[in-house]
Amino acid sequence: IQDVEIKYRHRHLDLISDVDSRKVFITRGKIIKAIKKFLDDRGFMEVETPVLQPMYGGAAAHPFTTHHRALDMKLYMKISPELYLKRLIVGGFEKVYEIGKNFRNEGIDRSHNPEFTMLEFYEAYTDYNYQMKQFEEMVSQVCVEITGATKVVYQDKEIEFKAPWRRLTVMDGIKQYAEIDPQDDAALDAYLKKNSDKPLKLDQLSRGEKQMKVFEIAAEPHLWQPTFVMDHPVEISPLTKIHRDNSKLVERFEPFAACMEIGNSYSELNDPEEQRLRLKEQESKRGTDEEAHPMDEDFLHAIETGMPPTGGVGLGIERIVMILTNCPSIRDIIFFPTMKIK
C-alpha cells in the first residue's frame, strides 16, 4: 500500500501487505522490553497510576476533560504520571517506573500524537547529574541490544549514542547559536520579533520564557547528535529544584537526538514551602497562560509529609522508537494513530 492515508486508517491492510511495517512494530515491542529489563535489573518496581485524575499536572499541556456521571465530577485524562509517582516515593517506594499512555489535547505533527507512550522513573537519593549518566547508559544499552551498535542511521544521517553525550546549558546554547546575550531583554525581544514564526505577546513573557523560545528557534535545529540541554530558567520549571550554583536556574535536563527532544529530567523539588510558592505563581498565570500548572493541594500534602531528594526522568517511547527504526513520522510507529474523521 503506497497511500499513507490507507496505511494509517486501515492498519490491518498495511500489516498484511508490508513486511517492513510489521518489523517496525515488532521492534517497538523489543525496545520497551529492553527498557523494562534495564530498570528491573537496577531494582526499580513497575507501577501504574490513574488515567482519570481529579487534577492534572506534571507537565505544561492542555488536558482532555470528561465527566463522571455517578460522582458528578469533572475528571482529566493523564498528561503525566509525575505527581502520583512522587507520592509513591513519599510512601517509601524509592525506585519506581511506569510505561503508559499520556494524553495531551494539542496539535498533531510528525513527532506529536494526542495520545502517546511515556516512560517515567523516579529514584530517591539521586539528582539530575546522576540521572544524566543513567539515561545515556540506558539508551546506549537499548540501542546496542536492538541494532547491534551504538551508532545508527536515521534519515540518512548517523547518530552516535555512545556515552558520554554532549552537555549544553540553555544559556550557552543561546550564546552559541543565537549569538546574543541571554540576559539582555532587548536582544531577546529583537531576536524573537525577527525569527518567531508566530506572533508573541512579549510583554506577557518572563525573561526565562523568552530565553527558552530563543533556544528553541536558534539551537534545537542543530542538536542532531545526542545532547543534554541543561540548567533551564526557573520560570518554566515549577516542579524542579533550584540550581545549587545559580538561583535563577533549575537542575533540569532535556535529552535531544535527531533535533527532537526525547525526554526530560529534574532534580525534583522536595521543599514543601518552595513548592507551594511555585504553584501559587503558576496559578496566578492561568488567566494568560492556559498551560500553567494548577494548584494541587493533595500533591502538596504529600510533599509536606516528607519527600527525600529524588531524581526523576521521562523518556518519550515513540521518539526513541522512531530513531531506532528509522521512521520519519510518529504515525509510522503507532498502530492506530489519531486521525481526523472523514
Image: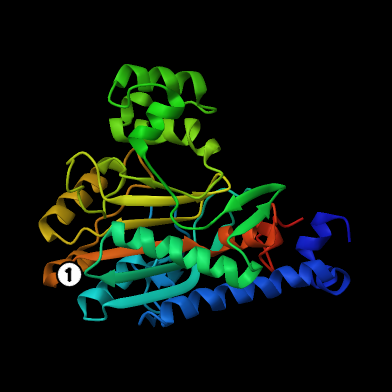
The reply to whether residue 206 is in sight is no
The relative height of residue 49 versus residue 324 in the rendered view (above or below) is below
Relative horizontal placement of residue 253, taking residue 242 as reference (left or right): right
Callout 1 amino acid: Pro
Residue for point 23% across, 66% down: 299
Q: Quadrant of residue 301?
A: bottom left
Q: Looking at the picture, how far across and down is residue 215, in whole percent? A: 43, 34
Q: Quadrant of the N terminus?
A: bottom right
Q: Name the residue at 68% across, 58% down.
A: 331
Q: Judging from the image, what secondary structure is the residue with disc 1 in?
A: loop
Residue found 18% across the figure and 40% down from its top:
246
Q: Position of residue 199 (x, y in %)?
A: 48, 26
Does 232 appear above or below 65?
Answer: above
Which residue is label 1 attached to? Answer: 308
- The percent position of residue 87, horizontal first and vertical second, equals 25, 73
Quadrant for the C terminus in the image: bottom right
Between 234 and 339, the one nearer to me in the picture? 234
User: Which residue: 30% across, 21% down?
Assistant: 185
